[in-house]
Amino acid sequence: METETLINIENTFRKAVIVGMQIDEQEYEIIQDLNELEALLRTLGIATVGRIIQKRVRPTASHLIGTGKAEEVKTLCDQEGAGLVVIDHVLSGPQIRNLETDIKRQVVDRSGVILDIFARHAKTNAAKTQVKIAQLEYLMPRLVGLWTHFGRQSGSGAGEKQIEMDRRKNRDRIGKLKKRLEEIEGERKVQRRSRRNEIKVAVVGYTNSGKTTLMKGLTSADTDGKDELFATLVASTRPIDPNTRPKILLSDTVGFIRKLPHGLIESFKSTLEEVLDADLLLHVVDVSHTSYNSQMETTTDVLKEIGADHIPTILAFNKMDQVDDPFLPRILKKKYSGSICLSAYSLDDIKRLRNHIFEYFEDKFHEACVLVRPDERDVLSLVHQKCIIIDANYEVEGEIRFHIRAPEIILSKLKKSDSHGGKS
Ligand SMILES: Nc1nc2c(ncn2[C@@H]2O[C@H](COP(=O)(O)OP(=O)(O)OP(=O)(O)O)[C@@H](O)[C@H]2O)c(=O)[nH]1
Ligand SMILES: [Mg+2]
């Protein structure tokens, strides 16, 4: 499948003016959101050359911002040579259309920008298909804006007919893509099922918090983190290094962001199933970021939305090397029990994190004794692969008595095989 960017922020645009709308938020929140929008645009290679905040707006259905403000935006674009206007608010089809007419520039909203980044970063078939579904779903309600304009001009009602045709076409495409995604995902499901007995940790968190960099440190993954938003779109799973018994698998996941387009969460649900499947979440926070608190909140909200808020979580406060306040680690540890402060760039810190994860699971392990006959291959492999062996003694007739520590789920499996012949 070609990597078509449906929202199509044209490649020729290198400069943008961004517009924030103060509706219910405080001004500092708007500023933080606009800083983030700038970072999103930077990821697309677009420089922000001006920003305008409209205060106390009462958004109108037709324009969202007042005509006076639209004029101001246009003047700033003229002055700064900007070809693109990005509004940090969800825009409807007619609103985009009307603003484009007034400002004489391409106008997109935050969701459009995020979808464009996803489209450009999507490498695998699964990611490309997921993004395309999200794009089409985003475009559906916005088709109205594109075509009513046309209809109004021709006065023939052709616009409405065209919208209906386009909608139907889009719905068909979405249906086909979803089917295709199911096929692609089938294989992953089989893989996931084969990992049913492994201990799984999903690395989650706000975009750019350092998930991939930590993952690389903890496993032998060869992917580097990137100073880009949404660098990772597909979950990759690897065992923690050095190989432990039982094996602990780590999954890198797609990052979260404020005002993530809803369709994206929906279409990335299958990727996010890695999260739902996990025994533990490692929630990575970029603590050097001024808005790390609200980033944590966003992550928690998205986790709730996908139904993963019941999974035990370790908070990892990352990028400590960028933090000047020497008291912060102590404050954070006190506030968030079981959390860890670290820098993904420090080998010692990575080691500490690894031990932190091990210790978490070790606490969940229980001790038991099992007696295994030499011909019970499955049981033997379960013991060797999934348990910590404290002691092993040979008994009569080659039977081995293992003194082990293992998670409850493994112990219950061993007990089950016991009832078929093994003894404990
Ligand atoms: N100073 C500092 N930079 C870090 C640290 N950890 C990661 N980074 C940098 O932060 C940027 C983002 O890191 P990634 O690992 O790509 O972040 P991510 O959470 O995987 O981001 P997405 O996949 O885009 O959601 C990269 O430039 C990293 O080199 C850290 O502990 N300290
Ligand atoms: Mg990443």
Image: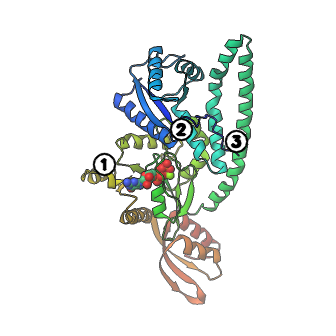
- Are there few (<14), some (14-19), or many (20+) residues within 10 Å of tag 2? many
Between the C-alphas of marks 2 and 1, the distance is 33 Å
Q: Secondary structure at mark 2?
A: helix
In the image, residue 131 sits, relative to residue 383, either above or below, namely above
396 or 276: nearer the viewer: 276
**Which residue is labeled 1 in the image?**
335
Residue reaching furthest top?
155
Judging from the image, the colouring scheme is rainbow
Q: Amino acid at mark 2?
A: Ile
In this view of the protein, can residue 169 be seen by the observer? yes
Number of disc labels: 3
**Which residue is labeled 2 in the image?**
114
- Are there few (<14), some (14-19), or many (20+) residues within 10 Å of tag 3? some
Could you tell which of marks 2 and 1 lies nearer the N-terminus?
Answer: 2
Q: Secondary structure at mark 3?
A: helix
Q: Amino acid at mark 1?
A: Lys
70 or 243: nearer the viewer: 70
Between the C-alphas of marks 3 and 2, the distance is 21 Å
Q: Amino acid at mark 3?
A: Lys
Between the C-alphas of marks 1 and 3, the distance is 43 Å
Q: Secondary structure at mark 1?
A: helix
Could you tell which of marks 1 and 3 lies nearer the N-terminus?
Answer: 3
In this view of the protein, can residue 283 be seen by the observer? no
Observer-side mark, 1 or 3, equals: 3
Dividing the picture into quadrants, the one containing residue 115 is: top right
In the image, residue 391 sits, relative to residue 323, either above or below, namely below
**Which residue is labeled 3 in the image?**
178
Please report the residue visible at 49 percent of the width from the left and 41 percent of the height from the top. Answer: 302
The spot of residue 37 in percent (x, y) is 46, 36
The spot of residue 205 in percent (x, y) is 46, 48
Please report the residue visible at 57 percent of the width from the left and 70 percent of the height from the top. Answer: 414
